[in-house]
Image (cartoon, rainbow, N blue to C red):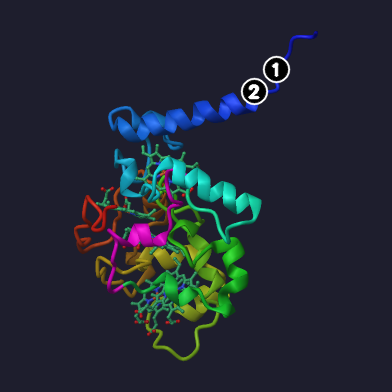
Amino acid sequence: MKKGFPRTGPLWVGLIVTVTLITAFNSPEQEQFLSPGGDREMHEGMACEQCHQETPGTLRQQVQANVHHWLGFRESGVGFITDPVGSEDCQDCHEMPGNLHPIHRFAHSEYFELREILGQHECSGCHDHHSPVNVVHSMTFCMHCHETWGNKPDTITPRHTTLIAEERWETCLQCHEFHGSRGHQEPTLLSEAFSVEQIQQYLDGNQPAPYSGKLPKYPEERKSQR
Ligand code: HEC
Ligand code: HEC
Ligand code: HEC
Ligand code: HEC
Ligand code: HEC
């Protein structure tokens, strides 16, 4: 008989991955090695379980529920070992009460198409913990929603209407915060704003934010732990 990759190969690979993950969650000193982002991540050194919460029930119950789901006896499966991470996990630490762009506002049907390219209805549409960058989109993404100015006060130099007509979308974050957490006071002259380079360095995760004002102190531990 020819020797090759055994038919049970995939089974073994699966088993090894599972054992590695279980080991990771049981030995916090080792876990960083197993993270997809390595040692350069948005929240450096944060424990996995702050976001990856254990799925309730024993492993046996989880396997049983999923097998029943595959066999069609159950409406839905359950998480396996850990639940998927969603915006509600982020909001357990980031309440952001004065958020100028809260995700719930962008869950409506008029924004459905935009979801595909921007993912503005979820934190993970713009942020990826397992990456060194702070924001995954180009700084020009304001263009998707602010192409019409209407009759709002427009006292800056150059005018908002001019910047929009000339598609100078890289200027928006030079003056404005996105969530507004720091209460940064926008200048009225573009010549007094932060440089595009400064903003890019911040979005890339290389420099702290240049905006004035202090961030609220976000908790190091989430409020509801399973
Ligand atoms: C600040 C929140 C956060 C922390 C802390 C965190 N993760 Fe994640 N992780 C996520 C999100 C969000 C995803 C993508 C959604 C999902 O798959 O649930 C993810 C996905 C993953 C994936 C799936 C692969 C992928 O790239 O989608 C693995 C594996 C993983 N994380 C391992 C870890 C390990 C190991 C740690 C601890 C060293 C850790 N994570 C810490 C938020 C976090
Ligand atoms: C356990 C609490 C906790 C959870 C959960 C958490 N964060 Fe954070 N986050 C923090 C803290 C504390 C900071 C402050 C800066 C730091 O320590 O990196 C922060 C900073 C940030 C920053 C700014 C990074 C920077 O360098 O300016 C972003 C963006 C962010 N978090 C997004 C998220 C997203 C998206 C999720 C969900 C996947 C999430 N956070 C989950 C506590 C948390
Ligand atoms: C449509 C894109 C987008 C979405 C969706 C989004 N963010 Fe952000 N976020 C940004 C941008 C751009 C910045 C950088 C500009 C700034 O600091 O104001 C930022 C900065 C942050 C910061 C650091 C500055 C601050 O205001 O605290 C945190 C923390 C943060 N985001 C958390 C979140 C959380 C939590 C969610 C989901 C509830 C979320 N973001 C959803 C685009 C987004
Ligand atoms: C998914 C759509 C969407 C995106 C993308 C978006 N915005 Fe907005 N923004 C809104 C909506 C809706 C409002 C509230 C109504 C308004 O003032 O137009 C708003 C309000 C604002 C306000 C006024 C906040 C206040 O009340 O004082 C500023 C400033 C702003 N956005 C800047 C930005 C910047 C800068 C970007 C890009 C980094 C951006 N927005 C991206 C939808 C969006
Ligand atoms: C030179 C700094 C500067 C730049 C660049 C800038 N803004 Fe503003 N923005 C302001 C100031 C200051 C205000 C307050 C109203 C005013 O004085 O015009 C404002 C107000 C706003 C408002 C709220 C209007 C209202 O009253 O509801 C929105 C929305 C907005 N800007 C979006 C943008 C977008 C999108 C861009 C990028 C095309 C941008 N801004 C570029 C400084 C700036």
- Identity of the amino acid at label 2? Gly
In the rendered image of this protein, does residue 127 appear above or below residue 2?
A: below
Q: Is residue 105 visible?
A: yes
Mark 2 element type: helix
- Disc 1 residue: CB within 8 Å of ligand 1: no
Q: Label 1 sits on what residue type?
A: Phe
Q: Which residue is mark 1?
A: 5
Q: Residue at x 64, y 23 (%)?
A: 9
Asked whether the viewer can see residue 131, the reply is no
Tell me which residue sits at (33%, 27%) in the image: 30
Residue 14 vs 153, above or below: the answer is above
Asked if the residues shown at circle 1 and circle 2 are in contact, with their CB atoms under 8 angstroms apart, the answer is yes
How far apart are the alpha carbons under marks 1 and 2?
6 Å
- Is 214 positioned to the left or the right of 102 in the image? left
Which is nearer the eye, 30 or 144? 30
**x then y, percent, for residue 86:** 43, 57
Residue 90 highlighted magenta (yes or no): yes
Quick check: 198 left or right of 167? Answer: left
Residue 172 on image: x %, y %? 43, 68
- Classify residue 90 as left or right of residue 112: left
Where is mark 2, residue-wise?
9
Principal SS element in the magenta part? loop
Q: Is residue 88 above or below residue 70?
A: below
Q: Does 132 appear in magenta?
A: no
**Residues drawn in magenta:** 80-98
Q: Nearer the viewer, residue 114 or 152?
A: 114
Q: Badge 2, how many Cα within 10 Å: few under 14, some, many 20+?
A: few
- Counting from the top left corner in percent of width and height, residue 133 is at 42, 46
Along the viewing direction, whichever of 173 and 166 lies nearer the viewer: 173
